[in-house]
C-alpha cells in the first residue's frame, strides 16, 4: 500500500524537472549531502539521474539530531515526467519504510498545469516505523504530516536557485485547496468574461459592485484593472447571506497564459468565511492556459489559513466536513456552470475541443493535467518530453467500465494501489477514498483497477463516512487473508447523477452508459 500527495507551484515544468534531476535535487535541505554512487545507463544531457542510477543521501547531525543516510536505485525514469526510486538502505532516518515482498519505493511525477507545475509524490510500503518515541503510536500519520507546507518550501528553493515564478508566489496558507478543469472555449474568451466588471464569469447569481482604481487611462470597456476593488453579495442555498470585498492585486495576460489574483479585504457571512493570518489575507487566483485542442485549462487556487464556520471551532469535525463539501461542490459544479455560462454569453466552442469535464484536484489530490506552452526562465525546453496525458501504467487501453465493481486480490504482498491518505472525509461527490496511483505491473494494474476511481468497501463491508484515507489504509494493511475483495466505484464523467452510499450498495454492480471515445478519461501518474 502507500499514499500520494500532490501540490502545485508557479514555475515551469522544464525548470522544476531540471532541478529535480540535478546533483543537488530540489526538495533537499541545505545541509543534505548527495552522492552519485553509480551513474546508470543512457544518461540524458543535463541530468544527473538515469535509469539504474544509485544515489546516496546523507543528512549530518544538526542541533543534536542524529545523522542519517539513505541509498536508493532509480527504477523508473521518463525524461521530463517521472522518476522512481527503490529504497535499498535506510540508516538513522526519522521514519523507516519497509515492505514484505520487495523494497519500498518512491516516485515523483510532474505535469503541466496553467502557469505552473503539479508535483505528485507517491510512497509504496507495507509499514512505517518511527525512531522517536513520541511518534511510535502513529508513525504513519506523523510521516504524512511532514508534507504539509511542502509547496512553500519548494517555492522558496526555486527562487533561491534563480528562477522566476510565472505568477506571484501563493500566500502559503495551510488550509487552501486547488481545483482544475477544462473548458471547451478559447482561453482569450474565458479571460475576457472573467475580467468583466459586471456579471463576470463564475459570478452568476451574485450582486457585484466594482470600485475602480485610480488610473490615468480609463478603459472604455467595462473590464477590470489592477487595483480595482469588488464587493460581491451572495446567498447560500440554505438561506444564509454573505458579502466579501476583495482587491484585484495582479492581472496578467500573455502568450503563456492568463492570471487573476484577488486578495480578500473583508468577509461577512452568516455561514462561513475564509480567514488569513497576521501576515497575509486570504487569496483566490485563477490561471488559464491553452490546451493543444484549442480549449482552455483552468486552475483555481483558494489560499487561506482556515475556514471559519459559524458556531464551530476550527478543529471541530463539522468544520472539516463543511470544507470538504465546499471543495466537492466546486469540483462538481464549476466546469458545467462555467461552460453553460460561456454558451449563454454567445461563445462557440473551440474547434476540436472536448466536452467540458473536470480534472479536479485539491492540494491533497491530483489527476492528469493538460499541457501548457509555458516556458520557464533559466532552462531550455526538454526535447521529446512525453505528453502530459500519456499513460505509464500497464493497464488495458480498452474503454473503462463505469459503475461499481469488485476486484479480488489473491496474491500476498503489496497491492499496487496508492490511496489519498490525506483525504479527511467522504462526501457525495467523492463516494469513497480516491485511488491516486496504480503501480505498473502490480496486482492492481493486472486487474485493471481504474486510476481516479474510489474505494467504497472492503470484503463486503462499506467504508463509513467517518473513515479518513489514513484509517482505510491501516485497515487494508491489517487484512492479510486472501482473497482480499475491494469494492471500487468508477464514476462516469458523462453521468449527471452522483453516487450515494445510502442508495447504492457497494456489493451490487451498477450499470452506466457506455462512454463514447471522447468521454474516455485520460489519467497520468
Image (spheres, rainbow, N blue to C red):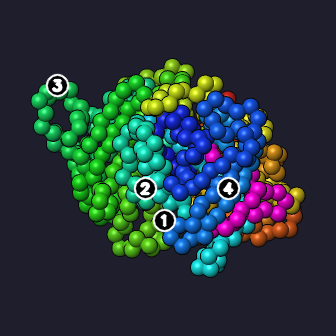
Front tag of 4 and 2: 4
Residue 436 drawn at (x, y percent):
64, 50
The nearer-to-camera label among 3 and 2 is 2
Residue 176: numbered disc: 2
Q: Main secondary structure of the magenta part?
A: strand
Which of the 4 quarters of the picture holds residue 68? bottom right
For the N terminus, the image quarter is bottom right
Q: Earlier in the sequence, mark 2 or mark 1?
A: 2
Closer to us: 489 or 164: 164
The reply to whether the magenta stretch includes residue 109 is yes
Per the model, the C-alpha gap separating discs 3 and 2 is 36 Å
State the SS at label 1: helix
Q: Residue at x 54, y 47 (%)?
A: 26
Residue under numbered circle 4: 123
Which one is earlier in the sequence, the residue at label 3 or at label 2?
2
Question: Label 4 vs label 3: CA separation?
Answer: 54 Å
| Residue that label 3 marks | 220
Amino acid at each position: 500500500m502507500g499514499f500520494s500527495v500532490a501540490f502545485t507551484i508557479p514555475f515551469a515544468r522544464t525548470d522544476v524537472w531540471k532541478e529535480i534531476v540535478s546533483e543537488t535535487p530540489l526538495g533537499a535541505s541545505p545541509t543534505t549531502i548527495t552522492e552519485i554512487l553509480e551513474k546508470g545507463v543512457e544518461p540524458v544531457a543535463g541530468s544527473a539521474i538515469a535509469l539504474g542510477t544509485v544515489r546516496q543521501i546523507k543528512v549530518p547531525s544538526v542541533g543534536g539530531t542524529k545523522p542519517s543516510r539513505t541509498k536508493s536505485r532509480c527504477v523508473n525514469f521518463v525524461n521530463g515526467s517521472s522518476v522512481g526510486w527503490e529504497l535499498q538502505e535506510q540508516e538513522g532516518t526519522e521514519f523507516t519504510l519497509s515492505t514484505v515482498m520487495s523494497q519500498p519505493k518512491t516516485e515523483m511525477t510532474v505535469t503541466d498545469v496553467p502557469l505552473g507545475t503539479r508535483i505528485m509524490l507517491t510512497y509504496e510500503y507495507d509499514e512505517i516505523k518511527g525512531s522517536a518515541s513520541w511518534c511510535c503510536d502513529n508513525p504513519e500519520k506523523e510521516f504524512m504530516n511532514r508534507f504539509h507546507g511542502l509547496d512553500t518550501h519548494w517555492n522558496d528553493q526555486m527562487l533561491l536557485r534563480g528562477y522566476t515564478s510565472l505568477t506571484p508566489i501563493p500566500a502559503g496558507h495551510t488550509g487552501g485547496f486547488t481545483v482544475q478543469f477544462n473548458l471547451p472555449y478559447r482561453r482569450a474568451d474565458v479571460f475576457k468574461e472573467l475580467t468583466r466588471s459586471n456579471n463576470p464569469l463564475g459570478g452568476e447569481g451574485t450582486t457585484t459592485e466594482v470600485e475602480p482604481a485610480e488610473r490615468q487611462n480609463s478603459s472604455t470597456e467595462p473590464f477590470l484593472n489592477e487595483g480595482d476593488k469588488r464587493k460581491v453579495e451572495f446567498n447560500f442555498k440554505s438561506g444564509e447571506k454573505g458579502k466579501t470585498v476583495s482587491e484585484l492585486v495582479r492581472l496578467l495576460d500573455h502568450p503563456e497564459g492568463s492570471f487573476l489574483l484577488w486578495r480578500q479585504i473583508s468577509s461577512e457571512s452568516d455561514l462561513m468565511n475564509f480567514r488569513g493570518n497576521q501576515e497575509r489575507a486570504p487569496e483566490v487566483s485563477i490561471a488559464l492556459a491553452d490546451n493543444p485542442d484549442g480549449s482552455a485549462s483552468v486552475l483555481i487556487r483558494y489560499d487561506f489559513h482556515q475556514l471559519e464556520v459559524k458556531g464551530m471551532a476550527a478543529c471541530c469535525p463539522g468544520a472539516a466536513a463543511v470544507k470538504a463539501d465546499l471543495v466537492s461542490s466546486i469540483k462538481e459544479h464549476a466546469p458545467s456552470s462555467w461552460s453553460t455560462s460561456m454558451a449563454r454569453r454567445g461563445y462557440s466552442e473551440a474547434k476540436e475541443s472536448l466536452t467540458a469535464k473536470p480534472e479536479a484536484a485539491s492540494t491533497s489530490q491530483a489527476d492528469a493535467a493538460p499541457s501548457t506552452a509555458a516556458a520557464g526562465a533559466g532552462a531550455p525546453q526538454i526535447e521529446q518530453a512525453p505528453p502530459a496525458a500519456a499513460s505509464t501504467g500497464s493497464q488495458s487501453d480498452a474503454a473503462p467500465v463505469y459503475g461499481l465493481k469488485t476486484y479480488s486480490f489473491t496474491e500476498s504482498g503489496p497491492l499496487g494501489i496508492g490511496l489519498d491518505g490525506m483525504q479527511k472525509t467522504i462526501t457525495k461527490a467523492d463516494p469513497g477514498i480516491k485511488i491516486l496511483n496504480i503501480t505498473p505491473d502490480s496486482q492492481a494494474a493486472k486487474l485493471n483497477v481504474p486510476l481516479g476511481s474510489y474505494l467504497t468497501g472492503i470484503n463486503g463491508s462499506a467504508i463509513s463516512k467517518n473513515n479518513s484515507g489514513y484509517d482505510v489504509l491501516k485497515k487494508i494493511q491489517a487484512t492479510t487473508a486472501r482473497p482480499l475483495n475491494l469494492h471500487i466505484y468508477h464514476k462516469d464523467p458523462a453521468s449527471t447523477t452522483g453516487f450515494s452510499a445510502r442508495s447504492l450498495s457497494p456489493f451490487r454492480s451498477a450499470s452506466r452508459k457506455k462512454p463514447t471515445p471522447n468521454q474516455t478519461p485520460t489519467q497520468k501518474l
